[in-house]
Image (cartoon, rainbow, N blue to C red):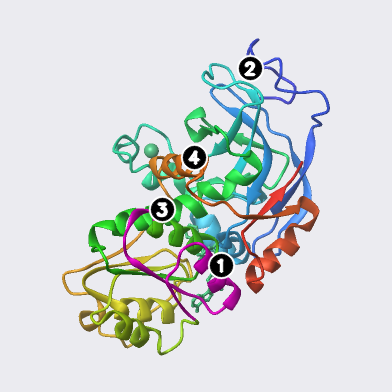
């Protein structure tokens, strides 16, 4: 639609006073180049769409991977540059497209992290994280939340917040909900009084500690090379911490548990964490590969290392149901939400802090 054109009469607010044509946004402009703060068009909501004013956008380690991803891979999965990073959005409804019901301007909302169509066979089964539409979405191949406004393609991707401040809600939609998906999948393998291991107690992993504490009676082990991350994990309920992963980690977990852990959730995903995690999983246990470290196992006999009668799984992104659960937990005060706030002009510094392991909560950028 040409700029300034109106889809229909019921969107008089698509351009609010003071809403210019462009806004500052943190974008991947060129493949394999550092993202830049640059100008991007302010989107207008078409029929069925919603414009959200971003109160806070959580930073994910995946963003760093995207910025370094070879362009050929990006193009192959249909992503186009430039696009604005940021897939953990909390904010307020700024404008409604035609036909959107159930929301009003100013409503505090969290935005479901992956996109989904709502009518394919995956979506109707509630496995919307596997919908083909999720291959590209806000902050990965399309404009995301590191800007004042973000366009939401359907109101089914919005969750209305009850008591939660939208500034801090964004990380729940990915860090909180992705870790919840991993814990929920592993639950049937975790015996009462058993052991669950979290490798990488960062943004996702520290939420996993909380979910394991809330949903199981397992002893929770956190493994991370950064001592401050381990201290934080203990605050959130971890019983045992291990500095690593080192070559001893699997042996240490076997020594602690006798026969291995019921579940190992790997939020790093490099060769050494995958191998240690698999070795530390008991017979009948579960190993989840969540981290996108692209680890490879060479010269390893999988027959010897995979958990006998157990389960090994990976997945990408949470479902809408996971997100609703996690937001309900946080909205009722049963899940701790810690964030480190950064203004948009310090976004690069926030990513550096994430890589250096000096964040406490999830880094959240406040563009407004
Ligand atoms: P983060 O940087 O907040 O946390 C990573 C943690 O791992 C840090 O605390 C770091 O100290 C620790 N770590 C690094 N090397 C380690 C090692 N060798 N052994 C143990 N711990 C180690 O990152 P995050 O945002 O929580 O993301 C974690 C991973 O999950 C990333 O790879 C990200 O791309 C991926 N991710 C996957 C999904 C999915 O759906 N599968 C969704 C979101 C993020
Ligand atoms: Zn779908």
**Labels 3 and 2: the sequence-earlier one:** 2
Q: Measure the C-alpha gap from mark 1 to mark 4.
A: 22 Å
Residue in the picture at 75% in, 22% down:
4
Q: Which residue sits at x=46%, y=63%?
A: 237
Horizontal and vertical percent position of residue 136: 51, 47
Alpha carbon separation for disc pair 4 and 3:
16 Å
Q: Nearer the viewer, mark 1 or mark 2?
A: 1
Q: Position of residue 132 (x, y in %)?
A: 40, 44
Cα–Cα span, label 3 and label 2 = 39 Å
Nearer to us: label 4 or label 2: 4
Helix, strand or loop at disc 2? loop
- Kindly identify which numbered label has been placed on residue 7: 2
| Span highlighted in magenta in the image | 214-242
Q: Measure the alpha-carbon separation of dots 1 and 2.
A: 49 Å
Categorize mark 2 by other alpha carbons within 10 Å: few (<14), some (14-19), many (20+). some
Q: Nearer the viewer, mark 4 or mark 3?
A: 4
Q: Please, is residue 9 above or below residue 37 in the view?
A: above
Residue that label 4 marks? 332
> Which residue is at a point 26% across and 63% down the rendered structure image?
190
Q: Tell which of 155 and 265 is nearer to you.
A: 265
If the image is split into quadrants, where does the C terminus sit?
top right
| Residue corresponding to mark 3 | 180
- Binning the other alpha carbons within 10 Å of mark 4 as few (below 14), some (14 to 19) or many (20 upward) gives few
Labelled pair 1, 4 in contact (Cβ < 8 Å): no
Q: Quadrant of residue 274?
A: bottom left
Q: Is residue 257 left or right of residue 118?
A: left
Which of disc 3 and disc 4 is earlier in sequence? 3
Mark 4 or 2, nearer chain start:
2
Q: Which residue is mark 1?
A: 232
298 or 90: nearer the viewer:
90
């Amino acid at each position: 639609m040409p700029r300034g054109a109106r889809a229909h009469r019921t969107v008089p607010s698509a351009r609010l006073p003071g809403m210019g044509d462009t806004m500052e946004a943190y974008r991947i402009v060129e493949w394999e180049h550092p993202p830049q703060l640059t100008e991007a068009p302010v989107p207008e909501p078409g029929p069925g769409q919603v414009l959200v004013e971003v109160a806070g956008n959580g930073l994910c380690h995946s963003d760093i991977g995207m910025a370094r991803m070879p362009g050929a891979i990006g193009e192959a999965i249909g992503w186009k540059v430039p696009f604005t990073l940021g897939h953990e959005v909390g904010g307020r409804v700024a404008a409604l497209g035609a036909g959107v019901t159930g929301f009003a301007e100013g409503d505090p909302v969290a935005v479901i992290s992956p996109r989904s169509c709502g009518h394919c066979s995956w979506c109707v089964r509630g496995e919307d994280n596997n919908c083909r539409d999720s291959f590209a979405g806000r902050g990965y191949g399309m404009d995301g939340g590191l800007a004042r406004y973000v366009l939401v393609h359907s109101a089914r991707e919005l969750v209305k917040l009850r008591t939660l401040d939208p500034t801090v809600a964004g990380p729940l939609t990915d860090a909180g909900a992705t870790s919840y998906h991993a814990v929920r999948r592993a639950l049937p393998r975790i015996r009462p009084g058993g052991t669950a291991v979290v490798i990488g107690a960062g943004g996702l992993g520290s939420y996993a500690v909380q979910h394991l504490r809330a949903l199981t009676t397992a002893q929770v082990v956190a493994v991370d090379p950064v001592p401050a991350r381990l201290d934080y994990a203990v605050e959130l309920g971890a019983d045992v911490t291990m500095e690593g992963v080192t070559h001893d980690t699997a042996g240490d977990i076997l020594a602690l548990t006798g026969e291995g852990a019921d579940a190992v959730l790997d939020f790093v995903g490099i060769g050494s964490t995958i191998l240690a995690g698999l070795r530390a999983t008991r017979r009948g246990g579960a190993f989840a590969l969540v981290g996108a470290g692209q680890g490879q196992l060479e010269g390893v006999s999988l027959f010897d290392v995979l958990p006998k009668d157990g389960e090994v799984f990976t997945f990408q992104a949470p479902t809408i149901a996971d997100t609703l659960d996690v937001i309900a937990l946080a909205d009722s005060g049963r899940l701790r939400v810690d964030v480190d706030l950064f203004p948009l002009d310090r976004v690069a510094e926030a990513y550096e802090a994430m890589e250096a392991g000096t964040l406490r909560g999830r880094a959240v950028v406040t563009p407004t």
